Amino acid sequence: GQNIDQPTEMTATEGAIVQINCTYQTSGFNGLFWYQQHAGEAPTFLSYNVLDGLEEKGRFSSFLSRSKGYSYLLLKELQMKDSASYLCAVRDSNYQLIWGAGTKLIIKP
Amino acid sequence: ETGVTQTPRHLVMGMTNKKSLKCEQHLGHNAMYWYKQSAKKPLELMFVYSLEERVENNSVPSRFSPECPNSSHLFLHLHTLQPEDSALYLCASSQDSAGGYNEQFFGPGTRLTVL
């Protein structure tokens, strides 16, 4: 079967750095996405990785290792508004997105 | 605003009711999706439409019936639902249903409660 694993909940301090991990086992791989979802709102796109390595976009970076079936989302200089759920999704051989259950990130002052 | 709108935002219905959810995208995309989101569970893909043709139906019960009259509009018709169908129903669109970068843009969702 296909599976995406990510921690259920994480807590971090304002101004700090947090890394959210995602491991996957899917039938084929055609890219990995990270989305942010604030409570009661739509998921919004954060990043896309299809090749190994680090993609940096402002305070957010995403890393991919296809051989290990592993990705992480790195958030720097955390702000209170970063409190949200972070969803990892992998596009499989049929180009369908397989989603993780999301990681709820709680930022404390 | 993501360019994808959904109505209604909240819906409470009895098990014998018939209702419809509406989604509209203003992005010129060719693919549209229905997802179900339950608490602490992964997003469940229900239906995919590409250029108004259904290309995916992930074993969804027949009490959920999609309709895509054109590439900008998507409906989900509901009838004789069960309490376990209570969830957030999300609509999304993307440029195409396969290949390339193909980020999905989501609507705000309809919070459905079945009594």
Image (tube, coloured by chain):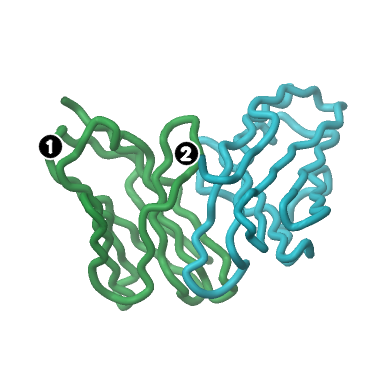
Chain colours: A green, B cyan
Q: Give the label on residue A15, or none.
A: 1
Q: Nearer the viewer, residue A104 or A79?
A: A79
Q: Residues within 10 Å of mark 2 (few under 14, many from 20)?
A: few
x 73%, y 60%: residue: B57
Q: Amino acid at mark 2?
A: Lys
Residue lying at the far left in this picture: please name it.
A16
A18 shown above or below B113: below
Residue A82 as seen in the image, left or right of residue A24: left
Q: Residues within 10 Å of mark 1 (few under 14, many from 20)?
A: some
Q: Where residue A12 sits in the image (x, y, percent)?
A: 19, 36
Kindly indicate the quadrant of the structure image that contains residue B6: top right
Chain letter for mark 1, please: A
x 65%, y 54%: residue: B33
Q: Where residue A9 sits in the image (x, y, percent)?
A: 31, 39
Asked if labels 1 and 2 share a chain, the reply is no
Q: Where residue A3 sits in the image (x, y, percent)?
A: 46, 61
A17 shown above or below A33: above
Q: Amino acid at mark 1?
A: Gly
Residue A31 as seen in the image, left or right of residue A54: right
For marks 1 and 2, give the CA distance.
27 Å
Q: Nearer the viewer, residue A51 or B96?
A: B96
Q: Where residue B18 sits in the image (x, y, percent)?
A: 86, 31
Q: Give the label on residue B40, or none.
A: 2
Chain letter for mark 2, please: B
Residue A57 as seen in the image, left or right of residue B49: left
Identify the element where label 1 is drawn: loop
x 38%, y 73%: residue: A50
Closer to the camera: disc 1 or disc 2? 1
| Quarter of the rendering occupied by the C terminus of chain A | top left
